[in-house]
Amino acid sequence: MACQSCATGKDGQPKGCKNNGTCGTDSCNKLTVFDWLANMSVPNGEKPFDWVEVRFKNGRKHYYHNSENLTLSIGDIVATQAQSGHDIGMVTLTGELVRVQIKRKKIDTKNDVWKIYRKASQKDIDIWSDARDKEEPMKVKARQFAIDLKLQMKISDIEFQGDGSKATFYYTAEERVDFRELIKIYAREFRIRIEMKQVGFRQEASRLGGIGSCGRELCCSTWLTDFRSVSTSAARYQQLSLNPQKLAGQCGKLKCCLNYELDSYLDALKAFPKTDAKLYTEKGTAVCQKTDIFKGHMWYAYEGEWMNWHLITAAQAKEIIELNKKKEKVASLEEYAADIVVDTKTEFENVVGQDSLTRFDSPKHNKKRKNNRNRNKKSTRNTVEAKSNNNNSSNNRKPKRKPNRKKPQNNNNKTNESK
């Protein structure tokens, strides 16, 4: 982020965007168009395109005619024409690229003409910022009023007009809601002109933003502008489990990313026979149980033997179907399955091109093993020293003298002496 309010502070903690989407650099806004024609000069004799793109809250954009020939650049705050009064927005695109955007969105520049009055003064900006500060507390009260009237609707967001004379309430609802009494309460409580605008659940998610299950920011709030319809057939073609908790996004509808790879899956399925086509063999009739689009394999099982699956390729299945059309039957699927060698060993390759993500980290040695080794070494040293000390002490000691024992005298000698 390039604006200073989004940078980190002196303590290293992020400040957070305090401009509420009105920063001058326009770098932290969603759905921003990069002006890649900004460095190109206009040919001689040609006037620059006098239409500009102005962005309002939550990525709402509109194109205005610069009838006063104001020198405008990206990031300027301008006062624009509205149905009553004026509105305040920020210029996000100028020059020839605006012509391309108008042509792409099929905007009528002759009948649908909205003008830019002037560059916003400090007084205009103060009134605008004060009105923006009222939106959050007003949204809490508006939701409470809708709950008290027991209306099946949800107030998702409120947007004030730049002059503070009008507020647009965005809401979502499953069915049609009679909110005439609610508008009377809003007008009496807030004392401004009220406009109710219903949006879809996808539009609500794009306005609020959030983090998807993939860990990235929502596509609808960053770059996705058109919301194509998503059906469960897209999940079936891609062989995904029809679990609503996994297939539903933050808006409660099916995820938009189910359509991203659908075309490639449909092209790959053209090489496969239809899954409802049966294979007729002499052993019995086989029904398709599973397909592997990436490897081109199909699994079939005989009727009555649903536990035993036989693996064949898509080309072999087509060959058997062609023979069945000629009213010919093959012997069995085992003959075709015997020709396929299934490699159960999966060799993982390093896609990133690096040996290891932790190859630069210092190896962490186990302290317990070190302590055990040191203890073992100390114990062996102590035992060796003890043995050596014992040996030295035994060598230095003087030999003990044996006690003199008197030898027993013979009785024969005694008898002789007595004689």
Image (spheres, helix red, strand yellow):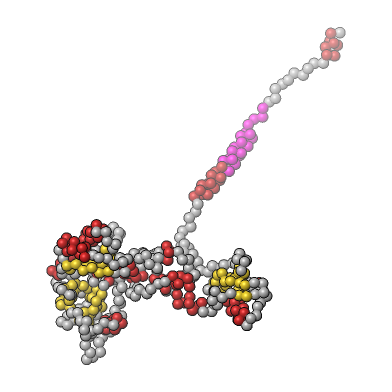
What percent of the width, then of the height, locates residue 99? Answer: 27, 83
Can residue 39 be spotted in the picture? Answer: no
Q: Residue at x 35, y 65 (%)?
A: 251
Q: Decide whether residue 242 is among the magenta residues.
A: no
Please identify the residue farthest to the top as the structure is shown.
419
Would you say 406 lies left or right of 135 here?
A: right
Q: Residue furthest bottom?
A: 45
Dominant secondary structure, magenta: helix
Q: Is residue 111 visible?
A: yes
In the image, 35: left or right of 240? left
Residue shown at 78% from the left, 17% from the top:
408
Which quarter of the figure has residue 256? bottom left
Image quadrant of residue 183? bottom left
| Residue name at image x 63 percent, y 37 percent | 391
Instruction: Specify the quadrant of the image occupied by residue 104.
Output: bottom left
Percent coordinates x, y for residue 210 in the rendering: 34, 64
Q: Residue at x 56, y 42 (%)?
A: 379
Residue range of the region highlighted in magenta in the rendering: 380-400
**Quadrant in which the C terminus is drawn:** top right
Please determine whether, in this image, residue 374 is positioned above or below residue 82. Answer: above
- Nearest the camera: 279 or 22? 279
Residue 164 x/y as whole percent: 16, 67
User: Looking at the image, which is closer to me, 35 or 13?
Assistant: 35
